[in-house]
Amino acid sequence: MSSSDIFIGETIGTAVLILLGGGVCAAVTLKRSKAKDAGWLAITFGWGFAVLTGAYLAGGVSGAHLNPAVTIGLAVDGGTKWSDVPIYLGSQFLGAMIGAVLVWATYYGQFQAHLTDPEIVNAKSGDEGMVDLKAAPKAGPVLGIFSTGPEIRNVAQNLVTEIIATTVLVLAILTQGLNDGGNGLGVLGALITALVVVGIGLSLGGPTGYAINPVRDLGPRVVHALLPLPNKGGSDWSYAWIPVVGPLIGGALAAYIFKLF
């Protein structure tokens, strides 16, 4: 794969991943959305389909890592050259930011209506935006559309949860999901990976919202901080390192487990 292949595939694939994944969070969260309050099942399956679509778009171009934890795991395993890792990570981060901006553009009217609603503006606690505002006072009412947040704020537990969930994801990719070259997702592997993401969301997503992907969380969180959203509140930067560090550890751990056993 050339550098341009990696850049194009990972940027477009990750952008679509975040557009569809963030889109289902917006659909379920925002007032005046037809899918308002559709619930956790809609979110988990929406993210699974988002992974599937992004992976099929990018698979033949860049291998469809779409996730720095996957890239690190494949580099540790030997399927991806370490010299290619920076361009993978940079294009994934760019794609995640583009996808988050597209979510905002798609739901622009709903964002405005939601964030100017007196019930939302005056809320001091609750579960708006998939984030517990009482437990996380620095998180704004729509931050959960862009990035994750814990239900119980405990650094050790939150970090371990992200490590465990990402280890499951990357182990599944290494054992079931790789293409013949071993450097990305294969056609059947993309479907298997998407189903694993749904399973992780249903089983392990409750504590932290299952980032399991550093750029999935960090890129949209940066966009949330930059967008001109009224009454948007904070971006909860004190928590932001956990969904970055946890998945990176999980990806590397999965690769070492795979090589060992």
Image: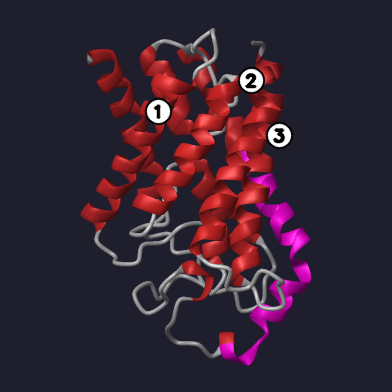
- Lateral position of residue 187 relative to residue 110, left or right: left
Q: CA distance from mark 3 to mark 2?
A: 10 Å
- Lateral position of residue 248 relative to residue 130, left or right: left
Instruction: Name the residue located 71 percent from the left edge and 71 percent from the top edge.
Output: 34
Establish if 198 lies above or below 257: below
Which numbered disc covers residue 1?
none
Instruction: Name the residue located 50 percent from the left edge and 18 percent from the top edge.
Output: 178
Q: Amino acid at mark 3?
A: Ile
Q: Which residue was labeled with disc 2?
A: 62
- Please provide the residue range marked out in magenta: 94-119
Within-10-Å neighbours for mark 1: few <14, some 14–19, many 20+: some
Which numbered disc covers residue 12?
3
Q: Which residue was labeled with disc 1?
A: 172
Q: CA distance from mark 3 to mark 1?
A: 23 Å
Q: Whole-percent x and y of residue 260?
A: 22, 14
Q: Amino acid at mark 2?
A: Ser
Label 3 vs label 1, nearer the camera: 1
How many numbered marks are there? Answer: 3
- Lateral position of residue 16 relative to residue 174, left or right: right
Q: Amino acid at mark 1?
A: Ala
Instruction: Name the residue located 57 percent from the left edge and 23 percent from the top edge.
Output: 188
Magenta-highlighted stretch: main secondary structure? helix
Instruction: Name the residue located 61 percent from the left edge and 21 percent from the top edge.
Output: 187
- Mark 2 lies on a secondary structure that is helix
| Labels 3 and 2: the sequence-earlier one | 3
